Image (tube, rainbow, N blue to C red):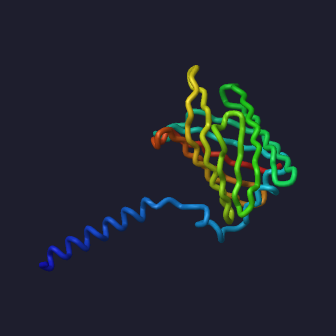
């Protein structure tokens, strides 16, 4: 093989490797050494407030909202009540039942969640995935949520969630939780 052909193959191999490395998504274990450590039992106990936005796939803000939350644990099970108030005056309520499965793993259910949500916590982060029944214009669509929550300090947690359907990004939800 001549040197120029070898150089082209090496460049192509290097570019392919860089592309594949760039596509690798982070996992919860990537945050294992991050502090403070997220303890859901502690963080989702008592009252919290969250402020959020929903942006469409172009990044334009479509909705703003405030969520009042209250969490209570009984052994390994949490009931997390969420009361949403949107900027257009619409109100919604979601009540989660979250089970601590041990080892940083969690499962959850709610009235508008399809099946069970699955979560994995590590370090200061929690990845929470589920399908949600989303009413839009008189119809209900099942959309997938991929939530990432990051504990900033003992009172503040940031949440970024990507919403998709059939793998196509529909938008993002960004929230800032504050423990009261």
**In this view, 97 is above or below 154:** above
Res 51 → quadrant: top right
**In this view, 154 is above or below 175:** below
Q: Is residue 56 left or right of residue 154?
A: left
Q: How many marks?
A: 0
**In this view, 27 is above or below 64:** below
Locate the N terminus and report the quarter of the image it occupies: bottom left
Which residue is painted at 60% across and 40% down in the image? Answer: 131
Name, please, the residue furthest toward the right: 74
Q: Is residue 17 left or right of residue 151?
A: left
**In this view, 10 is above or below 59:** below
Name, please, the residue furthest toward the left: 2
Q: Is residue 72 left or right of residue 64?
A: right
Which residue is painted at 50% across and 59% down in the image? Answer: 25
Res 20 → quadrant: bottom left
Which residue is painted at 72% across and 48% down in the image? Answer: 177
Q: Which residue is nearer to you in this view: 176 or 129?
A: 129
Q: Is residue 6 left or right of residue 173?
A: left
Picture coordinates of residue 6 (x, y %)?
A: 19, 76
Picture coordinates of residue 95 (x, y %)?
A: 76, 38
Res 67 → quadrant: top right
Q: Which residue is nearer to you in this view: 12 or 151?
A: 12
Picture coordinates of residue 143 (x, y %)?
A: 55, 37
Q: Which residue is nearer to you in this view: 75 or 150?
A: 75
Which residue is painted at 62% across and 37% down in the image? Answer: 132
């Amino acid at each position: 093989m001549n040197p120029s052909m070898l150089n082209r193959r090496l460049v192509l191999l290097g570019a392919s490797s860089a592309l594949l490395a760039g596509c690798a998504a982070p996992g919860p274990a990537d945050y294992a050494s991050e502090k403070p450590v997220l303890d859901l039992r502690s963080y989702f106990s008592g009252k919290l407030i969250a402020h959020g936005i929903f942006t469409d796939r172009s990044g334009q803000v479509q909705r703003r909202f405030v969520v009042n939350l209250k969490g209570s644990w009984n052994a390994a099970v949490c009931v997390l009540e969420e009361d949403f108030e949107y900027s257009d005056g619409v109100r919604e309520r979601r009540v989660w039942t979250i089970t601590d499965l041990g080892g940083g793993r969690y499962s959850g259910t709610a009235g508008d969640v399809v099946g069970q949500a699955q979560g994995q916590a590590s370090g200061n982060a929690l990845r929470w995935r589920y399908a949600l029944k989303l009413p839009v214009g008189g119809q209900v669509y099942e959309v997938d949520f991929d939530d990432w929550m990051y504990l900033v300090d003992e009172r503040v947690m940031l949440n970024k969630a990507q919403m998709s359907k059939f793998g196509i990004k529909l938008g993002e939800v960004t929230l800032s939780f504050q423990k009261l």
